[in-house]
């Protein structure tokens, strides 16, 4: 008879997977490798095509564009075509998130829009042996410590952060403890629509820590902020298969509907912005094999558990890092928790961005040899 692992055992095994060297491959015959390293840039053309099924008055569309510039991503250009009366790049006035806005008059017929975004992306990995003093805009750091509508930093969030980081001395120790806590206590829930909503207060209050990337990485980001460590979600889209053979960590470039994925970053004074993705650890544990892996030290999960603490694979594009996004020109009341999907509306109201076949949009990517 087998017994479930205790929370302490899960945390101990999480620590082993995240911090210790990988065990020899011969010890785990089925163990895989996941070690993204910075290297050559990859160039992609990312194409979003919208054909709204029904004309009901004026139609408005908002499409995310690559709006993150960093040492792991370089947006190059955006171009578009279709029958819009007006189309231009606009920005959320409060958050500065840029997006393509298009407006269609009823007389134009079926609203049609194609957006092509060219970008470069590559793997990233922190060098933990380097200990430089990294400077960053104080206003940006304050913004990434602040609460948002769905990411409070007080109450149960603060209480959980204190509990998760008990005994941790440095910011790196605290981040590692929170990463391990999320993997040990949360889980991937495939039935959640889209990427989830990121309502971490509700998750923690109910004890239901099942969700998808926008939920699970939001818990990580919220706990980091509550512990005094600047952190942010990075909302984006998978572009291509993983080079390491993990089917759940890649996508089919010919059909990227449903390939949206949120990652996370933390700011550490000695390392700058550092890649994190506990949500993808939980995705591999739940969906990579036919069995739900419960132990992060499992030979399939361990390389990902270790690798996604400080690394990303460059088969993904980051749209933006903003919460509480307002769509300029929209008649929608209130803001979006984040902008990761195409959005639209007409005289009947807002479209369901999580239903691409009804909305109706397609997304694809093509890697270029340049």
Image (cartoon, grey):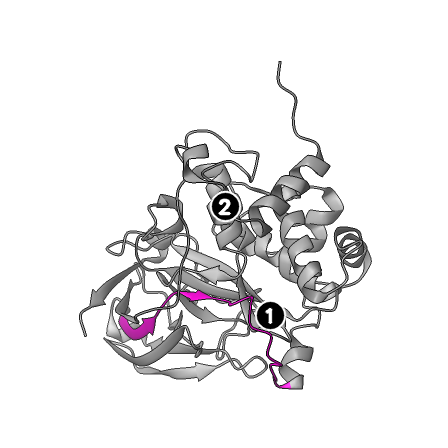
Q: Residue at x 52, y 33 (%)?
A: 293
Q: Residue 123 carries which label?
A: none
The residues colored magenta run 114-137
User: Which residue position holds label 1?
Assistant: 324
Q: Which residue is drawn at 55% across and 84% down?
A: 93
For the residue pair 203 and 62, the one nearer the viewer reads as 203
SS for dot 2: loop
Q: In this view, does 253 lie above or below 209?
A: below
For the residue pair 63 and 13, the one nearer the viewer reads as 13
User: Which residue position holds label 2?
Assistant: 22
Residue 35 picture quarter: bottom left
SS for dot 1: loop
Q: Is residue 334 visible?
A: no
Q: In this view, does 92 lie to the left or right of 199?
A: left
For the residue pair 115 and 321, the one nearer the viewer reads as 321
Residue 348's x, y, as percent? 44, 62
Q: Quadrant of the N terminus?
A: top right
Q: Which residue is drawn at 57% across and 50% down?
A: 18
Residue 46's x, y, as percent? 28, 67
Q: Which residue is drawn at 75% across and 51% down?
A: 164
């Amino acid at each position: 008879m087998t017994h479930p692992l205790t929370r302490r055992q899960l945390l101990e095994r999480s620590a082993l997977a995240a911090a210790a060297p990988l065990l020899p491959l011969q010890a785990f015959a089925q163990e895989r490798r996941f070690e993204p390293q910075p290297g050559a840039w990859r160039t992609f053309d990312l194409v979003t095509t919208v054909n709204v099924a029904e004309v009901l008055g004026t139609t408005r569309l908002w499409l995310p564009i690559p709006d993150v510039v960093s040492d792991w991503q370089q947006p190059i250009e955006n171009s578009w075509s279709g029958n819009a009366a007006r189309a231009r790049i606009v920005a959320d006035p409060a958050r500065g998130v840029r997006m393509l806005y298009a407006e269609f008059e009823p007389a134009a017929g079926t609203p049609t829009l194609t957006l092509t975004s060219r970008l470069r992306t590559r793997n990233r990995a922190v060098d933990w042996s380097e200990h430089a003093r990294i400077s960053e805009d104080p206003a940006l750091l304050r913004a990434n410590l602040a609460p948002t509508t769905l990411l409070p930093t007080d109450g149960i969030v603060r209480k959980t952060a204190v509990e998760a980081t008990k005994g941790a001395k440095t910011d790196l120790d605290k981040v590692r403890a929170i990463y391990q806590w999320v993997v040990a206590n949360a889980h991937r829930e495939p039935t959640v629509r889209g990427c989830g909503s990121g309502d971490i207060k509700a998750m923690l209050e109910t004890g239901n820590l099942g969700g998808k990337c926008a939920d699970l990485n939001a818990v990580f980001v919220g706990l980091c902020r509550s512990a005094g460590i600047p952190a942010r979600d990075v909302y984006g889209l998978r572009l291509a298969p993983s080079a390491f053979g993990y089917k759940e960590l890649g996508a089919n470039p010919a059909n990227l509907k449903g390939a949206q994925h949120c990652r996370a970053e933390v700011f550490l004074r000695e390392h700058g912005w550092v890649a994190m993705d506990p949500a993808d650890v939980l995705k591999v544990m739940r969906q990579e094999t036919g069995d739900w892996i419960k132990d992060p030290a499992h030979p399939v999960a361990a390389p990902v558990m270790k690798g996604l603490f400080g690394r990303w694979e460059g088969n993904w594009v980051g749209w933006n890092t903003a919460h509480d996004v307002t769509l300029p020109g929209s008649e929608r009341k209130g803001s979006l928790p984040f902008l990761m999907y195409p959005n639209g509306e007409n005289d009947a109201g807002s479209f369901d961005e999580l239903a691409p076949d009804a909305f109706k949009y397609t997304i694809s990517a093509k890697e270029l040899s340049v």
